Amino acid sequence: MEAAWAAAIVMFVALGSAIGEAWISTSAIKAMSRNPEMYSNLRTTLILGCGLTETTAIYSLVVAILIIFVL
């Protein structure tokens, strides 16, 4: 039972990651609408930022799976 609670707490990191990814995307879209000439640079930064943010969610999922099945 404790392992399930621990896994649930770890998965809140994924919620934070989703909020962060939405914030990154929103900021990039606002910047692209203000300055269309910088589209390619902003797109590259957006993809890099979303990729790094998504790895946090993947790591938290791996930790939650390890907590459930190993403990």
Image (cartoon, rainbow, N blue to C red):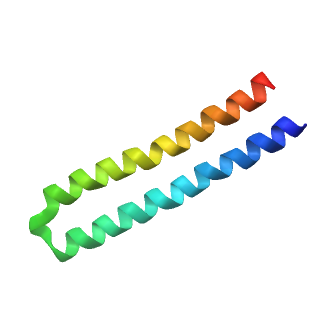
The vertical placement of 49 against 28, above or below, is above
8 displayed left or right of 40:
right
Residue 10: which quarter of the image?
top right
The vertical placement of 27 against 67, above or below, is below
Q: Position of residue 6 (x, y in %)?
A: 79, 42
x 77%, y 30%: residue: 68
53 displayed left or right of 70:
left
The vertical placement of 36 against 20, above or below, is below
Quadrant in which the N terminus appears: top right
Out of 32 and 13, give the one closest to the viewer: 13
x 53%, y 53%: residue: 17
45 displayed left or right of 51:
left
Residue at the extreme right: 1
x 24%, y 71%: residue: 31
Quadrant in which the C terminus appears: top right
Q: Position of residue 14 (x, y in %)?
A: 59, 49
Q: Position of residue 61 (x, y in %)?
A: 61, 37
69 displayed left or right of 21:
right
Residue at the extreme top: 70
Q: Position of residue 58 (x, y in %)?
A: 53, 38
Residue 15: which quarter of the image?
bottom right
x 88%, y 39%: residue: 2
